[in-house]
Image (tube, grey):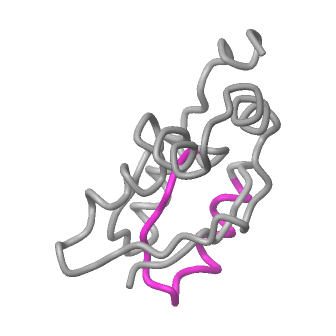
Amino acid sequence: MGEELLRVHTSYIDLIQDTIKQLDVHGISHITGGGIEGNTKRLLKEDLKLRIDWETWERPQIFELIQSVGNVPEPDMQSTFNLGIGLVFIIPQIQHNKLIDLVKLHEYSYYEIGEVI
């Protein structure tokens, strides 16, 4: 667990720069403390909401361990940790395939985790 917690976080700068040059990016959220929703909802106008599909990706084992050993309720896990999602782009649906191509080009994993409603 110690090695996992001390691992250097991923830098997304090249992916971000390429994406903002090539797509109509409405928002980018680097998921740190505060979870996916906490970090991403700050980008939205008050009348918009996020719908996250929490089953879209497989969580890294470290989060399963933290939840199990710490007896951490699921809502606390979601509001505190990134659960394996490091960066969120908000883009028009029509540009979805182009974003997938850019993410793969930069050798990252891609998950469509939700939508703005």
| Residue nearest the viewer, comparing 23 with 27 | 27
User: Position of 86 compared to 38: left or right?
Assistant: right
Q: Position of residue 16 (x, y in %)?
A: 47, 50
Residue 86 in the image: state x and y as whole percent: 57, 44
For the N terminus, which image quadrant? top right
User: In the image, 9: left or right of 66?
Assistant: left
Q: Position of residue 20 (x, y in %)?
A: 40, 61
User: For the point 70% across and 36% down, which residue is it?
Assistant: 67
At x 70% / y 61%, what residue is drawn?
Answer: 110
Q: Which portion, as a residue range, is magenta?
A: 86-105
Residue drawn at the location 64% of the way across and 64% of the way down: 54
Residue occupying the point 66% across, 58% down: 103
Residue nearest the viewer, comparing 74 with 46: 74
Q: Quadrant of residue 26?
A: bottom left
Q: Quadrant of the C terminus?
A: bottom left
Q: Position of residue 97 (x, y in %)?
A: 64, 80
Q: Is residue 103 left or right of 49 when viewed as pictured?
A: right
In the picture shown, does residue 33 fall above or below 98? above
- Residue occupying the far left of the picture: 46
With respect to residue 56, does 18 lie above or below? above
